[in-house]
Image: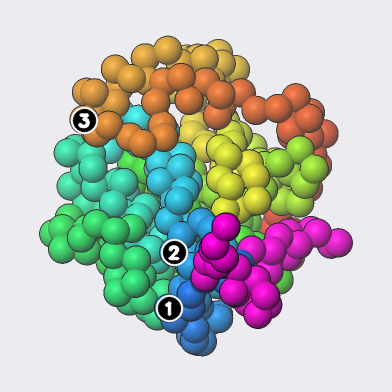
Amino acid sequence: MGDHHTIEDEREKAGFWFEEDVLPGLKVKMILKEISFNGESKFQQVQIIKTVFGKTLVTDGKTQSAESDEKIYHESLVVPAMLKHGSPKRVFIGGGGELATARECLRFPSVEEVVMVDIDEVVVNICKEHLPTWGDGCWEDPRLNLIIGDAYSNFESIGGKFDVVIMDISDPIEAGPGIALYTKEFYDMVASKLSPGGVFVTQSGSGDVHNFDDCMTAINRTCREVFDCVAPYTSSVPSFGGNWGFNMAWNSKDGEEKEEELKSWKTCLDINDRIKSTSHHDYSFYDGETHLGMFNPAKQLRRGMEKEERVITRDNPVFMY
């Protein structure tokens, strides 16, 4: 038998590894195949690397999206909220530097304007250069209004209402750039700027049974202080280390019981029809069958939501590990 060495074999011997902290006492470790970019912006360390998950955006040592499963994350974040609204015309994105969130929003023909505000121009430019398929050229779409700046202050100052507000921001880690965007104060402002029938969604950290209470349940509890209906859900994103959490929220229609409205969404059987009539796109991950699994998460997580008492405010933040 010949000696079949691969580049991975050589790098394993040489010790080129990417390590990411998940929990105290738990790290994930994978062979580092390539570093395309490694630098510092005003706000964070930014890297483009290649691992078993393909090309990957990493900020401050945390995976933000990876080639193998970015569509799982971005479709999960965007599509349910857009379908829940039904015919969104104006959308706000907080964060979303890879431009994949904008890509998914602009798939909907009803959309007339997407206002995207990301604080880090370095991330946006590096992703255009090194991860061009993430945005799929959406930055050339005249419906996209891309602003480099603070999402909180820009959202506060922009006039008019939004049909859908999507927060694709960094995890709420201490000294991170996005902590204020997880607070009750911000969610109050979101509710005031949603049009009738408007929908809000935010990425919410890990949705795994072993650490969903890191921040997902607190984000859910905070949303419930502001919105009538809050639907927590999860999707398996392997490059993030497991199930990832999201919270989608809206205010119930006049005369409709919020519990019934929540139940009808969690058990919705016409998602495939909604996709055909709104975005007309054949998604790689999300469809009607997947929807039922996403919005009916594990029993432990549902119990955690019921027991959670923490409300995130500017004075009482909750930090993710």
Nearer-N-terminus badge (2/1):
1
Tell me if residue 106 can be seen. yes
CB-based contact (under 8 Å), mark 2 and mark 1: yes
Tag 2, which secondary structure?
strand
Residue at 52%, 15% (x, y): give it.
267
Looking at the image, tell me whether mark 3 or mark 1 is earlier in sequence order: 1
| Residue ID for mark 3 | 280
Q: Is residue 258 above or below residue 113?
A: above
Mark toward the viewer: 3 or 2? 2
Q: Indicate the secondary structure of the residue bearing disc 3.
A: loop
- Identify the residue position indicated by label 2 in the image: 55
Amino acid type at image mark 1: Ser
Pointer 3 and pointer 2: residues touching (CB < 8 Å)?
no
Numbered range of the magenta stretch: 1-30
Q: Amino acid at mark 3?
A: His
Q: Earlier in the sequence, mark 3 or mark 2?
A: 2
| Residue 102 drawn in magenta | no
User: Splitting the image into 4 quarters, where does residue 277 fall?
Assistant: top left
